[in-house]
Image: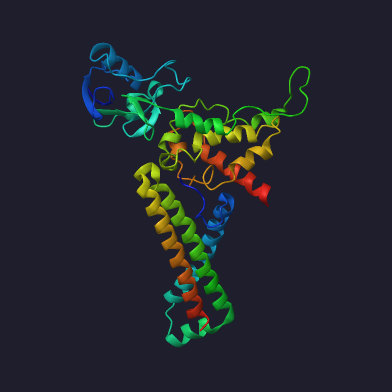
Amino acid sequence: MVTAVTSLSRSGLSDWLVQRVTAVILLAFFGFIGFKLAGGVSYAEWSALFAQSWMKVFALLAALSLAAHAWIGMWGVFTDYLTERLMGGKGNVLRIGLQLLTSLSLVIYVIWAVQIIWR
Amino acid sequence: MLQVSIYRYNPEQDAEPSMQDFQVDTGGKDLMVLDVLELIKGQQDTTVTYRRSCREGVCGSDGVNINGKNGLACITPLSECVKGNKLVIRPLPGLPVIRDLVVDMSLFYAQYEKVQPYLQNDTPAPAIERYQSPEDREKLDGLYECILCACCSTSCPSFWWNPDRFIGPAGLLQSYRFLADSRDTATEERLARLDDPFSVFRCHGIQNCVNVCPKGLNPTRAIGHIRGMLLKRAA
């Protein structure tokens, strides 16, 4: 049976709220990045931008949001399509395996992002 | 002659389902889809099986998939659904087929039962009846009209994938019907039962339910109200 054991917060309401809040943060971040890139930037300007504390916080916030957003989203996809109902016992194995892989990758990406941003 | 293709499956005889073609003389009239089914059953093949009762969109028995869209056969005119002189009728998607166009609605009813679709009030019963202001009564409009035909829930992909966990648009519309009722005192218990990742939150708001509802109801809006109540309760 499909359960909530690998969902981000185990609560439907909380997952739903986090999904929406992180979406707004991601929109703001990528909107800002797109705006900066569209204006044309040199390496020096780009480097100076990311040297500022507020930009580091903003970028880290975006990285954390992306991880949470992806966790919840992929959990939704996996629990829809990779289930015992649709695929038999191997659905459970496949789903749990991919969920763990996704979660692990996201945690690694966040740590990696911290390393890049706060270097 | 109208080209009609009907989903046929008799589990006692057929290894797998198939589509059977019929030619129907509509006499140039804009018949309802149910009339076409009746013509086929009466004149061409008596074994074609479907549910029907009131034939006027009240009982909700003849929900079927008509040219790809769920609807009640009795109130869907051919002019609304036929394209290129072709009419394809299949059972409601996502539920087990018992025979031809008849589906097993057990999962659908089990979800309906989960929302406890009856008035609950733990205060002493008044001598005559529980009064409700016209304003409070108005809140039930667009909710109480549901006839449980299952057109909405069986057009919902979230219900297809998790019919055992996601309550589905029909059940949630009824859930909100009692959450919104000023005479019901079990609001807290009702909300507590909905706060898991599946019951309500499998809805991703694609509004297939709104698109197909033969009564013109809006389950997505009701689900939005439930989310709002859950948020308010938790905040």
Of the 4 image quadrants, the one containing the N terminus of chain B is top left
User: Can the viewer see residue B32?
Assistant: no
Q: Please tell me which residue lies in front, A40 or A54.
A: A54
Q: Residue at x 50, y 31 (%)?
A: B110
Quarter-of-image position of residue B38? top left
Question: Residue A48, how many percent across, how many down?
Answer: 51, 85
Quarter-of-image position of residue B23? top left
Quarter-of-image position of residue B33? top left
Q: Residue furthest bottom?
A: A44
Q: Please tell me which residue lies in front, A75 or A61.
A: A75
Q: Residue at x 48, y 68 (%)?
A: A107
Q: Residue furthest top?
A: B42
Question: Residue B101, how many percent across, how many down?
Answer: 33, 24
Q: Residue at x 65, y 30 (%)?
A: B138
User: Can the viewer see residue B144?
Assistant: yes
| Rendered view: B194 above or below A44 | above
Q: Residue at x 42, y 15 (%)?
A: B53
- Judging from the image, the colouring scheme is rainbow
Question: Residue A85, how many percent across, how many down?
Answer: 39, 42
Question: Residue B231, how many percent across, how many down?
Answer: 63, 49
| Rendered view: B49 above or below B186 | above
Count of numbered tags: 0
